[in-house]
Amino acid sequence: MKISELVKEFEIYTSNDEKKMLEQLTHARPLHSFSERDQFTIESLIRKSLVIKIGDTNPRVIANEL
């Protein structure tokens, strides 16, 4: 039996705040342009691989196309 037969739907859990943030990240924006609370939410989305962080010194973020 294959895993795809057992698991019909795969979804990554996101909170309401994370869902709202994903809707806002349609294009690359500097991480420092967000409030501290939003940055914390974005870091959580980065760990879940739902957001891509571009660059090291002045990072920009954009929603990951899944």
Image: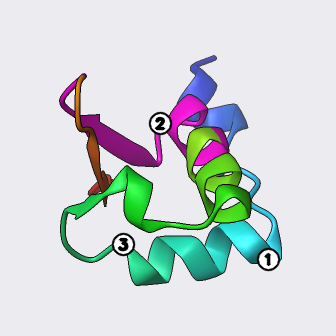
Residue 57: image x %, image y %? 23, 25
Q: Counting residues from the N terminus, which is met first, the one under dot 3 or under dot 1? A: 1
Residue 9 visible in the picture: no
Q: Secondary structure at mark 2?
A: loop
Q: Secondary structure at mark 1?
A: helix
The x, y position of residue 66, in whole percent, is 33, 54
Query: At label 1, which amino acid type do we have?
Result: Asn
Q: Are marks 3 and 1 in contact (CB under 8 Å)?
A: no
Residue 2 spot, x, y in % from top left = 57, 20
Give the structural element (helix, strand or loop) at label 3: loop
Q: Is residue 24 left or right of residue 1?
A: left
Instruction: Give the magenta range.
Output: 44-56
For the N terminus, which image quadrant? top right
Q: CA distance from mark 3 to mark 2?
A: 14 Å
Please determine whether, in this image, residue 50 is positioned above or below residue 54: below
Q: Nearer the viewer, residue 66 or 45?
A: 45
* Residue beneath disc 3: 25
**Quick check: 30 left or right of 32?**
left
Kindly identify which residue carries mark 2.
49
Against 8, residue 15 (above or below) is: below
What whole-number distance in Å separates the C-alpha atoms at marks 3 and 1? 15 Å
Q: Amino acid at mark 2?
A: Ser
Indicate how the structure is coloured in the image: rainbow
Identify residue type, mark 3. Leu
Residue indicated by mark 1: 16
Q: 7 or 21: nearer the eye?
A: 21
Towards the viewer: 8 or 35: 35
